[in-house]
Amino acid sequence: MSSASSAEAVTRDKVADAPSDAGELTEQEQQILALERQWWKYAGAKDQAISDQLGISGVSYYQLLNRLIDSEAALAHDPMLVKRLRRQRDARQRARASRR
């Protein structure tokens, strides 16, 4: 197994275990929220930052983020950001449901 595929295996394990709801955010969870706070003019720039700063794929990032914004620890850490992300996710889900 190459180092790239072993890194992906570790990333998949991290995605399966996260987020922690024990009351405190892990360093990775805090980094995800910090990255999400930034303004992204171009989607490609955000994808590159995810890879560079966190060392995970965009898919893994968004899986972690979706689980993270449902946690009480994330809400306590940054309530305005988490509420905004929840509203955006809910609006996207409603838009998808109305197209069916």
Image (spheres, helix red, strand yellow):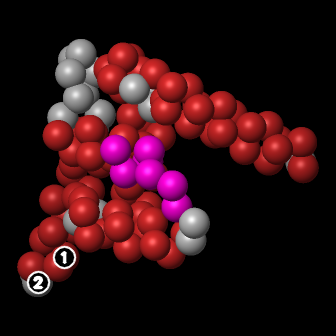
Residue visible at 72% across and 44% down in the picture: 92
Q: Amino acid at mark 2?
A: Ser
**Image coords of residue 61 (percent x, y):** 38, 55
Q: Outermost residue, right direction?
A: 99
Q: Amino acid at mark 1?
A: Ser
Of the pair 7 and 82, the residue shown nearer to us: 82
Mark 1 lies on a secondary structure that is helix
Of the pair 17 and 36, the residue shown nearer to us: 36
Q: Which residue is mark 2?
A: 2
- Quadrant location, the N terminus: bottom left
**Image coords of residue 65 (percent x, y):** 42, 43
Q: Is residue 88 above or below residue 43?
A: above
> For the magenta stretch, what is the residue range?
34-40
Question: Image quadrant of residue 52?
Answer: bottom left
Label 1 neighbourhood size at 10 Å, few (<14), some (14-19), many (20+)?
few
Q: Is residue 64 above or below residue 60?
A: above
Label 2 neighbourhood size at 10 Å, few (<14), some (14-19), many (20+)?
few
Residue 37 is inside the magenta segment? yes
**Taking 86 as reference, is 82 left or right?**
left
Residue visible at 13% across and 71% down in the picture: 6
CB under 8 Å between callouts 1 and 2?
yes
Q: Which residue is mark 1?
A: 5
Question: Image quadrant of residue 7?
Answer: bottom left
Of the pair 68 and 100, the residue shown nearer to us: 68
**Taking 85 as reference, is 2 left or right?**
left
Residue visible at 82% across and 44% down in the picture: 95
